Amino acid sequence: MSRSPRIPRAGDAKLSPALYRKGTPPADPSGLAAEFKPSTSSQDLSEFEYALIILMFGFQRWVENCIGAANVHGLNALDTLVLHTVNHRARGKRLAEICMVLNIGDTHLVTYALKKLAAADLVLVTPIGRERHFETTADGEKACLEYRIVRENFLVPSLSWVSGRDDSVNDTAGFLRMMTALYDQAGRFATAATAGQPKAPPVHTKR
């Protein structure tokens, strides 16, 4: 009878990289995992963040389904949100304004979305001086209107039981805006606090 393969133990001096790839966790030489004890507030925040992740991807999926139901195909969630931002209040907007409204730091993402929208004849690009201004075309205006109609018919009625409960939707919107400000502030503090520390090299993501 052949012997079964030996199962690696925690006390083994060396484990091959192949075992790591199969899910065997490496040891914690710094001991940080044993010392770190998350607070109750940290655990509550984790619950909120998990719900936020689910909401984020659920909202993106809804935006894509809604614009598709409006008979506009080929746009992802970001393309659609950029289109609505350009269409808002029907005036030309600069790239910086669009990024600021959507709270997007990577301008390349918005630039690419605007190129797609312009190629689809949904957005008109007008050079003014050294900047370019963006506004929706007639087709872009129609797409936004059809989107709002689909939203009004299929999403808004589902929220009627929530919106009637002591302004819970408005309160939630205010809470999310407050959390956005707290995340931005904490990110700035964390960056400033670690600015003088040695930086590890970037992780290798290419295979």
Image: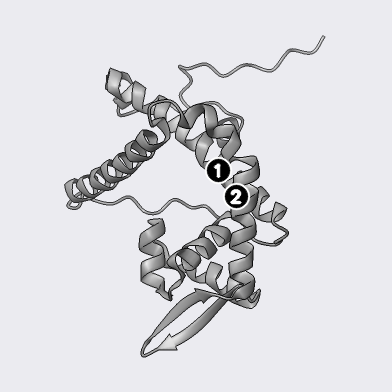
- The residue positioned farthest toward the bottom in the image shown: 129
Count how many numbered circles sit on residues in the image: 2
- The residue positioned farthest toward the right in the image shown: 1
The quarter in which the N terminus is drawn is top right
Q: On the image, which quarter does residue 44 sit in?
A: top left
In the depicted view, which residue is nearer to us: 195 or 9?
A: 195
Q: Which residue is mark 2?
A: 63
Residue 124, position in %: x, y? 54, 79
What is the spatial separation of the Cα atoms under label 2 and label 1, in whole angstroms? 6 Å
Does residue 166 appear left or right of residue 155 in this picture? left
Identify whether 32 is placed above or below 137: above
Q: Contact (CB < 8 A) between labels 2 and 1?
A: yes
Identify whether 167 is placed above or below 71: above
Q: Which residue is mark 1?
A: 59
Quick one: SS at disc 1? helix
Quick one: SS at disc 2? helix
What label does residue 43 carry, if any? none
Q: Residues within 10 Å of mark 2 (few under 14, many from 20)?
A: many
Residue 63, position in %: x, y? 60, 50
Q: Residues within 10 Å of mark 1 (few under 14, many from 20)?
A: few
* Residue type pointed to by label 2: Val
- The residue positioned farthest toward the front in the image shown: 164
* Residue type pointed to by label 1: Phe
